[in-house]
Amino acid sequence: MQETQLKIENQEQKKAIPDARIFTMPEQYRHGKETKVVEPKIQQKPSSSPISPATSQPLPKSVPILQVKKEFSSSTKALLIAGAVILLALIVVGYILLRTSQPKTESQIKPTSETQPTPRPEPEPIPAPEPEPEPAVESPFTNEIVPGKDSDSDGLTDIEETIIYKTNPNLPDTDLDGFLDGNEVFHLYNPSAKSPGTLLEAGFVSRTTIQPNIELMYPSIWETQAGENLSVSIITTTGETFAVSVISQTQEAFSQTISNWIEEQGGQENVVKTTTKTGKEFYTTQDKRSAIVVIGTKVLSFKYDVSTKTTVDYVQTFQMIINSLKEVVL
Ligand SMILES: [Ca+2]
Ligand SMILES: [Ca+2]
Ligand SMILES: [Ca+2]
């Protein structure tokens, strides 16, 4: 009886309500008469808010749950799609950033590789010049005789100033008279003091006769030694010697003697012709270690032998000796 009544009521409801999906519900939901018609309306609401269906206890549970699940699934799909799109966008942005950053590193590496070849040519020329000057400098210095050290550049070497003339090797004008120490020695003046005025008066030089009518001056600390054919050797305290000899005695032979001597010294280009302080004809070599002086009819030869030394320390004193030559009236 009840079923027939329900059917009739349902049929009436069908007419009133065109929605036929209500009858597809399972039988469990059919027990609630009043709620059957209202269920779909209420069920639509809980879709938005799942809490409301809990208020109506008899309401079916499976249908709203499925719908919610469907709605959740659709929303989650949307979210997943959105998330995937965002992830893809992030990946794309990341790739772009990586691509932009990679060429930078490549470009940075390239210039470094490009800058590397620039320093390469620099070290190459450095080792090349080093070995070249070393052998070139060593070979000439070992065999070459060089001038002695003149610290104050006054024309006297440090050895001449300290050993012979007692002047200051670091003061060009020791006696402050306006003339350099070397210039005073050249002219036979005393460089160590204003008075006495000459080397002879100060005792720094002594006189000696090398020929019957020719005399010269030499440092008093040195010694003279007579040799063969009226030759004289002036011996220094440091091993050097000055050999003085007459190579021509006659007027007829002296011009030929001079030309022969010039040839022996290497020709005119290697000989300088001047005059002594006393006005005598004077020839000397470029190294100032060989010289001849014409006095009257005689040609005197002077040779500066450095012996085993590699420095020429007495050039100015050698010049002083030659400048002191003079004829003596017998
Ligand atoms: Ca000096
Ligand atoms: Ca000096
Ligand atoms: Ca002076």
Image (cartoon, helix red, strand yellow):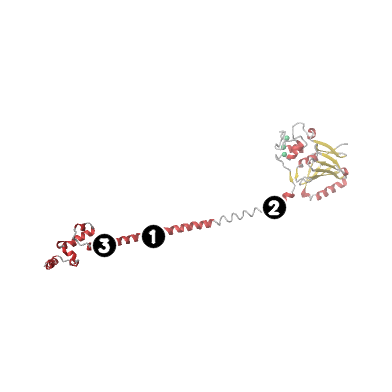
Toward which corner of the image does residue 313 lie, by quadrant? Answer: top right
Mark 2 in CB contact with mark 1 (< 8 angstroms): no
Point out residue 255 in the picture as x, y percentages from the top left corner: 84, 47
Kind of residue at badge 3? Lys
Q: Which mark is residue 69?
A: 3
Q: Which mark is residue 136?
A: 2
Quadrant the N terminus occupies: bottom left
- Residue at point 19% right, 65% down? 28
Kind of residue at badge 1? Ile
Point out residue 185 in the picture as x, y percentages from the top left corner: 76, 37
Count of marks placed on residues: 3
Q: Secondary structure at mark 1?
A: helix
Q: Secondary structure at mark 2?
A: helix
Can I make out residue 156 in this image?
no
Q: Is mark 2 within 8 Å of ligand 1?
A: no
Whether 195 is drawn above or below 263: the answer is above
Give the residue at the far front of this rendering: 1
Q: Residues within 10 Å of mark 3 (few under 14, many from 20)?
A: some
309 vs 326, nearest the viewer? 309
242 vs 61, nearest the viewer? 61
Toward which corner of the image does residue 59 lie, by quadrant? Answer: bottom left
Q: Nearer the viewer, mark 1 or mark 3?
A: 3
Whether 198 is drawn above or below 116: the answer is above
Nearest to N terminus: mark 2 or mark 3: 3
- Residue at point 77% right, 49% down? 270
Q: Which mark is residue 91?
A: 1
Q: Residues within 10 Å of mark 1 (few under 14, many from 20)?
A: few
Q: Is residue 43 left or right of 189 when viewed as pictured?
A: left
Q: Is mark 1 within 8 Å of ligand 1?
A: no
Kind of residue at badge 2? Ala
